[in-house]
Amino acid sequence: MTQGVFHSTARAQSPTFSPLYRQIKDFLIRSLEKGEWGPGDAIPSEGDLAARFNVSQGTVRKAIDEMAAENLLVRRQGKGTFVATHDDPRSFYRFLRLAPDDGKITQGVSDDFSCETVMASAEVAEALGLAVGDALIHIQRVLRFADEPVVFDQIYLVAELFAGLTLATLRGGERSLYSVFESDYGVRMIRAEERLRAVAADRESAARLDVAVGAPLLRVERTAYTYGNKPVEWRLGLYSTRHHHYRNELG
C-alpha cells in the first residue's frame, strides 16, 4: 500500500469516525483473515507497520496492544509479536472456564466417541446463521481430568468448513480440538459467547459423567466465532461441578 492511501481509503469505506489505531487494527485483522500471516508467524515490526500505513509507531503500538489483549497476537520479549495459535499449550483450554476445587491443574483428555453429518435444528441454525436442515458436523465427546469425566460436549460445526473431518482425525494425536481446526482446516476460533444455566442430569448425561440421574450440572451453550465475526461452532456442554467450579475474571 502506498503512503497516504490508507487514510482516504479507510474513510471512504466507513461513514462514521473511527480512531486511527482502530483503523490500523481492522486492517491487521483483515490481513490475518486473508492469511498474510498465519498462526505462529511473526508479524512485521511496529516500525515497519508504521511506515507501511504512514502513521506513528505509537498508533501501531496501540492497535497491537488491543489485539494482544484479545488474544489475536502474542508479544514475546526480545523476539517480536506473533500471531496467536491454538497449538500453544497455554491456549488449549482458553475458552474452558472450569477450575479444580483443589487448585491442582491437570491436563485434560478428550474422549471423542462420535462424529457424523447431521441436519441443523432450528436452535443450532439460528446460532450459526444457517437455514434449518443445512449440513452440520456433530461431534460428541467427554472431557476427562485426572481420569474423572467432567464435561459432556455436543459440538456442531458448519460442515462446508470442515469437509472430511472424521472421528479418526479427532483421535489422531494430542492436539486440542481448536488446534485441529486451525492446523487442518484453516479455521481459527477468535472469540466465544456463552450462556449458562443450572440443569439436572438426564439418563444419558448421568451415564457419561458418572453421576446420578437428577444430579446438578452446569449447562453451557457456546457459540465460537472466527475472523469477520463469523459463527462456525455451536456447542452444548454439560459440566459436572462435583470437584470443579466455573471461574471467570472480570474487570
Image: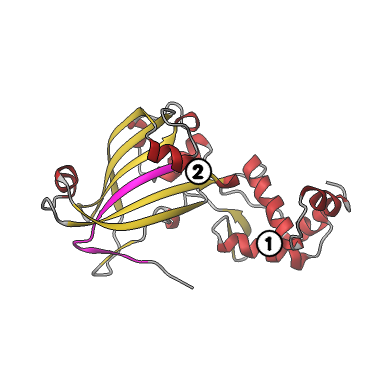
Q: Secondary structure at mark 2?
A: strand
Where is residue 93 shown, x and y percent of the image? Answer: 39, 55
**Could you classify mark 2 by the number of other residues whose Cα lies within 10 Å: few (under 14), some (14-19), or many (20 or more)?**
many
The three-letter code of the residue at mark 2 reads Pro
- Of badges 2 and 1, the one in the foreground is 2
Q: Is residue 92 visible?
A: yes
Residue 70 found in image quarter: bottom right
Residue 104 within the segment the image draws in magenta: no
Q: Classify residue 137 as left or right of residue 101.
A: right
Q: Which residue is mark 2?
A: 231
Q: Which residue is mark 1?
A: 63
Whether tag 2 and tag 1 are in contact, CB under 8 A, the answer is no
Where is residue 173 shown, x and y percent of the image? Answer: 35, 39
Magenta segment, principal secondary structure? strand
Q: Secondary structure at mark 1?
A: helix
Identify the residue at image location x=75%, y=65%.
Answer: 59
Q: CA distance from mark 2 to mark 1?
A: 24 Å
Identify the residue at image location x=78%, y=53%.
Answer: 15
If you read the primary sequence from the N terminus, does the residue marked by circle 2 or circle 1 appear first?
1
Q: Classify residue 192 as left or right of residue 138.
A: right
Q: Is residue 171 visible?
A: no
Residue range highlighted in magenta: 231-247
Q: Classify residue 125 as left or right of residue 187.
A: left
The three-letter code of the residue at mark 1 reads Ala
Identify the residue at image location x=44%, y=55%.
Answer: 91
**Could you classify mark 1 by the number of other residues whose Cα lies within 10 Å: few (under 14), some (14-19), or many (20 or more)?**
many
Residue 94 found in image quarter: bottom left
Q: Classify residue 99 as left or right of residue 209.
A: right
Is 32 rendered above or below residue 23?
above
Where is residue 6 shown, x and y percent of the image? Answer: 83, 52
Q: How many marks?
A: 2
